[in-house]
Amino acid sequence: MTDSNMSFLGRISLAMGTFFNILGDRELAAGVRRLRDGTGPGASPAPAAPVPAAVPAPAPAPVAAAPAPSALKEASPEAALQLLGLLQRDARFIDFVEEDIAGYSDTEIGAAARLVHDGCRAVLREHFTIRPVREEAEGSRVTVPDGFDATAIRLTGNVVGSAPFNGNISHRGWRVAQVRLPRLAERHDATVIAPAEVEL
């Protein structure tokens, strides 16, 4: 399977691992931001003027108008740290991710993953209302109209021409409709996502 055709579970694993790595590594977070801004390694600067091609060829129309650049705001880490704490408390998520699983069999890893999955699912359902972005079943044929929300719909595959686009839903997407995180005491240290345990 190529990097551009990762499975849904593979994308979840990559997203979760990257999410927590970014939380713990300022340099990685800065590098990801540079990549998203198009200023990271390998990003090519925009040419000052278009270079005429030797053989004229029709250029594909832009998929969607780029939104006007907006000022970046600093994200508060408290909610992310609180979610990490809930995932650790109810699913032992960090224990599972930080464990070196090379010495375990697939059966042992699968049994542990089932417990982590159940706990993570319980946390999400208790503290979030999550709805699909698209209501149609995966595999359904749909039309994406002109002026579609590019933050809610990502076009993949052979994207040529301009909207409307016709294609199949490969993933319905997720949107958070409601967040119900507990309130934190003023002096609560959110960086301690799981206290050390001392048995007496």
Image: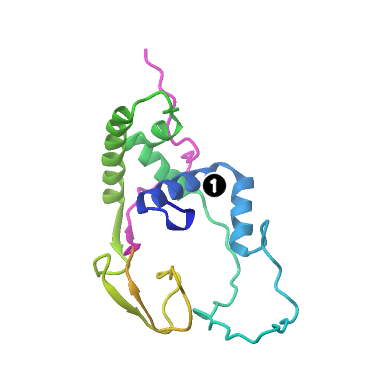
Question: Could you tell whether 64 is left or right of 10 in the image?
Answer: right
Question: Could you tell whether 69 is left or right of 5 in the image?
Answer: right
Measuring from the top left, give residue 99's x and y in whole percent. Answer: 43, 28
Please report the bounds of the magenta region as a residue range. Answer: 171-200
Q: Residue shown at 27%/31% (left/top)?
A: 111
Q: Main secondary structure of the magenta part?
A: loop
Is 56 placed above or below 105 here?
Answer: below
Q: Residue shown at 68%/56% (left/top)?
A: 41
**Residue position marked by numbered label 1 in the rendering:** 22
For the C terminus, the image quarter is: top left
Measuring from the top left, give residue 13's x and y in whole percent. Answer: 41, 46
Residue 99 or 79: which is nearer the viewer?
A: 99
Measuring from the top left, give residue 92's x and y in whole percent. Answer: 35, 33
Is 95 placed above or below 200 here?
Answer: below
Give the structural element (helix, strand or loop) at label 1. Answer: helix
Measuring from the top left, give residue 58's x and y in whole percent. Answer: 57, 86
Residue 185 or 149: which is nearer the viewer?
A: 149
* Residue 6 colored in magenta in the image: no
